[in-house]
Amino acid sequence: MLFENLDIIEPIQKALKEQGYIKTTPIQEKSIPTILNRKDFIGCAQTGTGKTAAFAIPLLQNLSNEKIVKKGPKPIRALILAPTRELAIQIGESFTSYGKYVNLKNIVIFGGVSQKPQTNALKAGVDILIATPGRMLDLFNQKYIDLCNVKYFVLDEADRMLDMGMIHDVKRIIAQLPKIRQTMLFSATMPKEISKLVDSIVKDPVKVEVTPVSSTVDTITQEVYFVRKKHKKSLLKHLLKDESIDSVLVFSRTKRGANGITNDLIKAGIEAEAIHGNKSQNARQRALNNFKEGKIRVLVATDIAARGIDVHELSHVINFDLPEVPETYVHRIGRTGRAGLKGAAISFCDEEEKEHLNDIEKLIRKTIPLIEEHPYKIIAGSTPIAKKKTVKNTSTKKYSKNRNSSRRKNKLPK
């Protein structure tokens, strides 16, 4: 369906056209009319399917159609909770873009930075508050936040809230919200504890599942390389000799590992930066902006820090370490192949990670093709990692797309 065929007001339509939004994704097509009709909504969809626009567009319209009776600073009328700073910032940017021509104000609050600018903005008045749960509760307890006028509540990436141990903070926040409100919950997966939470906070919801839970996007090519742990960095540098791997997000299981990978790439002449929880918010945002702008080719991240990274036309995701939780694999590779574009996901698997690979393949209900043609494969006579169907190396295929020709290329020294 086309956005122009939806019942969206002209100011928002104008902003969407400027952003190049023409055709809706399935989750947008099904959620926007429902939310406009002020129904509680549960959306279960993969990462990268356009969930932010699915709730931001109708919320902006509903808020713009309401008249504020209260005098003085604007009261908070919509609250959006997100698990990470990066995702909260991304949501805030989306609200600003879609709401360019409507008179609504949004702010983003999160921890790790001074609260002074945030409390000043809250005092000045705001229509839409986007927040991470920890800082949200902190400022609420300090009485900087009044939730009495909230009419719309969105819980985004609910499953990740559970993974990161935020669910109790979320429940405390929900307990402070007005009973009469419109509630929207979005999640890539629906664990039992999230299902219980859903049942307790929504009323007669419309539930939409646009893709099977925990499935991967068909436009993403997936490959796995069996390689010993000590050879992973060498394999990564070998793959990056292929300049068609234009922009790559590398996932490390640990912060220390992310730093080590980054330093190794820099020594090899590859521009890279790390993003993880030990980095300051300013450093994380600077690295992310450099990656989005093409100033660096490789961004190395941990799972928590990578949540909310939305880079248009990201060509590759590389799982340097396989995740221990199989659902995390779906979240990771969902950073590429977004909005119908093609992408590639490459995974490294050592002897200790075979069980994780089996769990991932069981979850996504497919066998990930094994690439054997590489210089760091397990040599003959050593203990095999697994028996898998092998395919010809496709990782060096050119990734065709229209990119800004000014993007910097990185070559390894011969």
Image (cartoon, helix red, strand yellow):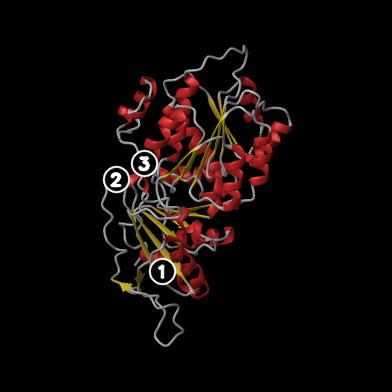
Q: Residue furthest right?
A: 142
Observer able to see residue 40: yes
Distance, label 1 to label 2, CA atoms, is 26 Å
Q: Earlier in the sequence, mark 1 or mark 3?
A: 3
| Image marks 1 and 3: residues in contact by CB distance under 8 Å | no
Front residue (pair 64, 138): 64
Q: How many marks?
A: 3
Answer above or below: position of 63 versus 199: above
Front residue (pair 75, 396): 75
**Residue type (three-letter) at the residue carrying disc 3:** Pro
Q: Residue furthest bottom?
A: 381
Residue drawn 42% across the image and 28% down it: 98
Q: Which mark is residue 26?
A: 3
- In the picture, measured across the screen, residue 264 lies left or right of residue 201, that is left
Front residue (pair 392, 165): 165
Query: Mark 2 = which residue?
Result: 403
Distance, label 3 to label 2, CA atoms, is 26 Å
For the C terminus, give its image quadrant.
bottom left
The quarter holding residue 124 reads top right
Other residues around mark 3 within 10 Å, as few (<14) / some (14–19) / many (≥20): some
**Residue type (three-letter) at the residue carrying disc 1:** Leu
Query: Mark 1 = which residue?
Result: 235
Q: Give x and y (percent) for residue 199.
A: 59, 42
**Residue type (three-letter) at the residue carrying disc 2:** Arg
Distance, label 1 to label 3, CA atoms, is 38 Å
Front residue (pair 292, 159): 159
